[in-house]
Structures are given as structure tokens and as C-alpha cells.
Image (cartoon, coloured by chain):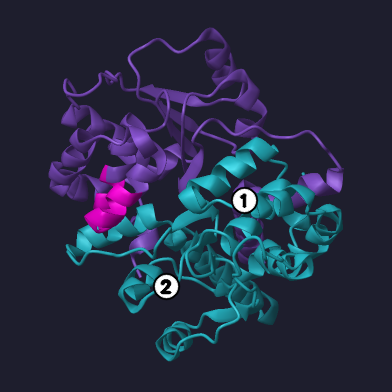
Chain colours: A cyan, B purple
Amino acid sequence: MGEQKILEEKLEEEEKKDQEVLGQSTVALAAAEAREGGDELFVPPLNFAMVEDGVFRSGFPETSNFNFLKTLKLRSIIYLCPEPYPEENKEFLKSNGIRLFQFGIDGSKEPFVNIPEDTIREALKVVLDVQNHPLLIHCKRGKHRTGCVVGCLRKLQRWCLTSVFDEYQHFAAAKARITDQRFMELFDISSLKHLSTSCTGLEKSSVA
Amino acid sequence: MGEQKILEEKLEEEEKKDQEVLGQSTVALAAAEAREGGDELFVPPLNFAMVEDGVFRSGFPETSNFNFLKTLKLRSIIYLCPEPYPEENKEFLKSNGIRLFQFGIDGSKEPFVNIPEDTIREALKVVLDVQNHPLLIHCKRGKHRTGCVVGCLRKLQRWCLTSVFDEYQHFAAAKARITDQRFMELFDISSLKHLSTSCTGLEKSSVA
């Protein structure tokens, strides 16, 4: 009987998880909110885009973006700048139970770019851990630092370099940097390939 | 005792569902494939991007893109051109159990653009039905026809027009058309708001 109770509780948990998963779909959200007949407009952050299930990218989130970000039901944010996070953003994270992972990468311009490979690798470990999803990766403009992290993720997903660069340039546009592209090309994913098996905790999903 | 058995089975089902959900994540896929040590490179279609959970966009998929598309585990494709689908693409759909929804929209150039609002609306109904996910929306270059469908979806998600246009221009780049933007601005989502409740079948996820 106690065993059955445990099973019932487990089942409830699983059902909740499913609802959360469905709840993450903003298509679902559109339907739900259309039903509520709300008419407030959402303002995504600069350079906002979806990278993968549960992984988003953008420029720095302003207070005007907070209501939109709420719809993503974020569990974590990866912030790639060394500057301290503004109070209002900290407040937003706190009141929405979002965990902040800060990796302070200097946004220095060419020809003085020096992207710390180890820091990008640490950030990628956080991205690969589905326990941190839904997750937003952002820097200041969502072009260079964010672009390098996403580009290295694409390499891990075995995208050809042409497509990795095309996506990078898509966001960096006129500000695209050869040095960023060289960094992505030379970035060694072998250690992450190994780590990703232990980091992502996806054994159960990939054993098939 | 029988009741407990039912609960155990339900629990297994829930866990399977979770695994399927995780299985759709290409981050998960990266981990799984890294483990297999495969080193084939994937070639996403021209202008490929993720729109939402289970919704992707791109230009016309070539045979070189098929292996990448397999990783998306697509259930449906929305094809927005009037030209018949090539044999090799039909073959790909058949062998991967992907359903094709064709909405033949003429890709005519300005100043002769005439975007059929009803056709876009029908395409959106297919997009909003999660039963069709994972789903790929594509036309020829993934700029204008695909951009209009995604732009109208963003309106339904209550994105401000500035962000809708920014995303459209992101993909259309130098080929951005004022006529497409005017179409998106004037597109009436009210009928879809109503339909989305019945189309998306998301009641269970939004009752919360």
C-alpha cells in the first residue's frame, strides 16, 4: 500500500514533467494565451533565436524583454560577459527561480581578440546538461561570444563548418569576425564528446 | 495489487514518453552520436533554423541535407511552392514516414507579389497542430514564403512587429520585401486565435 502511494506520487511527478515539457512550447503558449484573449505584445531580446529544444540565444535582456522571457520558463541563463549582472536582471532571475551561470569573457575587438577556449568549454558543459534546460545563452549583442558558444555546439552536433559559419554570420552580420570563425574551426570538441555522455545524463534517452 | 500493476505500467509509459521527448533533442543526439564516435558531417538545408519546439524552417532540402534531416525525426513537412516535389525528396519522405503538406504559393517577385492569405492561414493550422510535430516549413530559399508563415506565427505568439520584421529580415537579408512585411502586419490572426484552441489540442498542457 505504501509502495502504491510512492508509485502514485512518482506518476504525478511524471505527469507534471510532461505538462512542463508541453508548457515549454511557445506554440502551445500562443494557443493558451489566445484563449485567455490577452493582447499584451511580447518583446524578445535583441538577436533572440531558438538554438535547440530548451536552448535559446540572444543579446542582453532588457527589462522590456522580461515578460517575453517568462514565457520561455527558463531554468538557467548563461551570461558570457565579465560585467556584473544588473540589479533588475538579478531580481528577475530571483523571482522566476532562474539560475545564473556567468562566464566572464572579455568582448575585446579585433585584432586583440583572445577567446578563452577553456571558458567556452565550461559554458558548453552547462549547455549540454539538460538539467539546466530551458536555458538562455546571452552576451551583450548576441553576436560574437554567444555565436562562438553556439558554433562550438554545432560542431559537437557535427554540422559542417560552412553551416556553422553561415549561422554565425546570420547573427553577427556586418560585425562577423574572422578570428571568431578561426576559433570555432580550431576548437577541439573531442574532450566534450567524451564529457557529453556523462554531462547530459542522456544515457536513458540514447540507449535505443 | 492489480491497481499497482496498472500504476507501474502507466509509470513505464510516462518514462518512455520522457525518453522520446529527450530523444528529439539534437543536443541529446550530439551526445548519443559522440558516443557512437561517428564522424560524418551533417549539412543542414540552406537558411535552416529552429522556430519553436518541434518546428523548423529552411530553404529547399537537397539530397545532401537528407542525413541531417533524419536527425530531426520529422513527422511532417510543409512545402510552400506550387512546383511538384522531386522524386528523390518524395522517396526520402516515404522511407522516413514523413507526411507532406503542400501549399502552392507562387514565389512571384515585386511589384507583382500576391500572397494568398487563406493559404497562409491553412498552412498555419498545420503548424499549430502539435500532432504534426516535429515539422519543417520550407519553400525555395526559406526567405519570403517561409518568412511570411513564420512571421504570422510570431504575431499569433504576440511578438511585437519590430521583432517579427527583424526575424524576417534576418533570413531574407538583402532580399527583404516591403510587400511581405505589409502582408504580415495586416494579416488577421483573430480567426486562428479561435482555431488554435481546437487545432493545437493543447488543452491538457494549458489547463494549469
Screen quadrant of the C terminus of chain A = top right
Could you tell whether B77 is left or right of B21 in the image?
left
Q: Is residue B63 shown to the viewer in this render?
A: yes
Could you tell whether B126 is left or right of A127 in the image?
left
Q: Is residue B156 magenta?
A: yes
Estimate the x, y position of residue A196 in percent, counting from the top left.
78, 59
Camera-side residue: B85 or B165? B165
Q: Chain of mark 2?
A: A
Residue A61, numbered circle: 2
Residue lying at the far front of the rendered structure:
A111
Q: Is residue B153 above or below residue A142?
A: above
Residue wearing tag 1: B25
Q: Residues within 10 Å of mark 2 (few under 14, many from 20)?
A: many
Could you tell whether B57 is left or right of A124 in the image?
left
Q: Chain of mark 1?
A: B
Q: Is residue A140 magenta?
A: no
Secondary structure state at the residue bearing disc 2: loop
Q: Is residue A65 above or below residue B152?
A: below
* Mark 1 and mark 2 on one chain: no
Residue B57, numbered circle: none
Quarter where residue B102 is shown:
top left
> What amino acid type is highlighted by mark number 2?
Pro
In the rendered structure, are the residues bearing label 1 and label 2 in contact, judged by CB atoms less than 8 Å apart? no
Estimate the x, y position of residue A54 in percent, counting from the top left.
54, 60
Secondary structure state at the residue bearing disc 1: loop
Could you tell whether B158 is left or right of A91 in the image?
left
Magenta stretch bounds: B152-166
Q: State the predominant SS element of the stretch in magenta.
A: helix
Estimate the x, y position of residue A135 in percent, counting from the top left.
55, 67
Estimate the x, y position of residue B85 in percent, counting from the top left.
45, 13
Residue under the image location 44 percent in, 82 percent down: A96
